[in-house]
């Protein structure tokens, strides 16, 4: 007997990734997009119509549905209250947009709420599924690079504006928006935790109160270090691509350079 298709809901389309998630769910015949809730009713109703889902005016109403999984795609500071509320009603899994939270205490509270209610909590890190990254990870696992000594990384993109530049909703600018992807890739490659972070930030592109540029040095267990050049430096119209996520991995046996978006 075939099992019933997973029933999924999306909470908020504040983050632009929600649009691609909804399209992906709609295209899967083995998944049911039960409904959409959004703090912006106009946006929520519009997306519900586009994706053939029901729009829920009240958060409590959508959470009362029988749901297997819920995607949280709100602004960053709303991740914690939404995840804690969702965890209390006990779906099997929550996928939360990155970054997990804007404070360490908030992140720990979200994890604790999900553990208490036996709910799987995942954070959206799509770059780890890039074929280029998977090939590099396999090469390292096979020992072809020897001992890893350092990683030089970049993550440049366009400034998304909107709530992303409202620090009370985002928690910061380009650094909080772009560091998390590379930090996740480094951790996955190295299998080690970061022990020290040094960062410098600037606002030389837009000259606002939020940072549009950052340079970080991250030291991991065992002394391996990485550098990250991150910014909202891509102009909206004149640059041919949205941005980049690149890694240059240096080991005792050689170097591997990968571009997450521009390699097959």
Image (cartoon, rainbow, N blue to C red):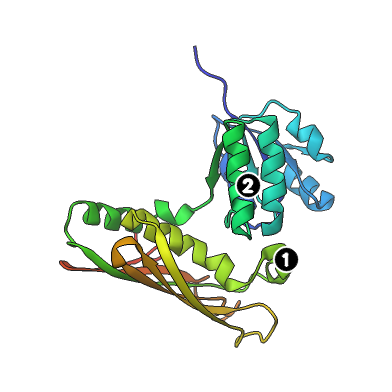
Q: Residues within 10 Å of mark 2 (few under 14, many from 20)?
A: some
Q: Nearer the viewer, residue 33 or 60?
A: 60
Which quarter of the rendered picture does the C terminus lie within? bottom left
Residue 86 at what x, y percent from top left?
A: 69, 38
Mark in front: 2 vs 1: 2
Residue placed under numbered mark 2 in the picture: 109
* Residue 93 on image: x %, y %: 57, 35
| Pointer 1 residue | 163
How far across and down, in percent of the image, does residue 54 sit? 76, 36
**Residue 172 in sight here:** yes
Q: Provide residue 166's location: percent of width, then percent of height.
A: 73, 70
Residue occupying the point 34% across, 70% down: 225
Task: Please tell me which of labels 2 and 1 falls first in the chain.
Answer: 2
Residue at 63% in and 51% down: 18
Q: Tell me where residue 195 sits by quadrant.
A: bottom left
Dots 2 and 1: beta carbons under 8 Å?
Answer: no
Side of 233 relative to 49 (left or right)? left
Q: Tell me if residue 118 comes above or below residue 23 in the rendering.
A: above
As drawn, the label of residue 182 is: none
C-alpha span from label 2 to label 1? 23 Å
Q: Who is closer to the viewer here, 112 or 209?
A: 112
Q: Nearer the viewer, residue 196 or 141?
A: 196
């Amino acid at each position: 007997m075939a099992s019933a298709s997973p029933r999924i809901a999306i909470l908020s389309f504040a983050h632009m990734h929600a649009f691609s998630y909804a399209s992906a769910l709609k295209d899967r015949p083995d998944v049911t997009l039960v409904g959409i809730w959004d703090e912006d009713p106009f946006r929520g109703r519009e997306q519900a119509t586009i994706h053939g889902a029901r729009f829920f005016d009240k958060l409590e109403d959508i959470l009362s549905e029988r749901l297997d999984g819920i995607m949280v795609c709100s602004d960053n500071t709303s991740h914690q209250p939404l995840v804690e509320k969702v965890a209390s009603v006990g779906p099997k899994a929550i996928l939360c947009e990155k970054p997990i939270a804007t404070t360490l205490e908030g992140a720990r509270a979200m994890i604790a709420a999900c553990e208490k209610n036996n709910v799987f909590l995942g954070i959206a890190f799509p770059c780890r599924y890039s074929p280029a990254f998977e090939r590099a990870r396999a090469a390292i696992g096979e020992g072809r690079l020897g001992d890893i000594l350092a990683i030089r990384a970049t993550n440049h993109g366009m400034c998304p504006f909107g709530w992303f530049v409202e620090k009370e909703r985002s928690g910061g600018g380009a650094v909080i928006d772009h560091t998390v992807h590379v930090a996740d890739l480094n951790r996955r490659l190295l299998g080690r935790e970061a022990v020290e972070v040094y960062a410098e930030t600037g606002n030389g592109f837009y000259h606002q109160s939020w940072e549009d540029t950052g340079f970080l040095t991250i030291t991991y267990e065992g002394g391996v270090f990485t550098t990250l050049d991150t910014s909202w430096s891509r102009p909206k119209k004149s640059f041919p691509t949205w941005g980049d996520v690149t890694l240059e991995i240096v080991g005792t046996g050689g170097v591997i350079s990968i571009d997450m978006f521009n390699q097959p």
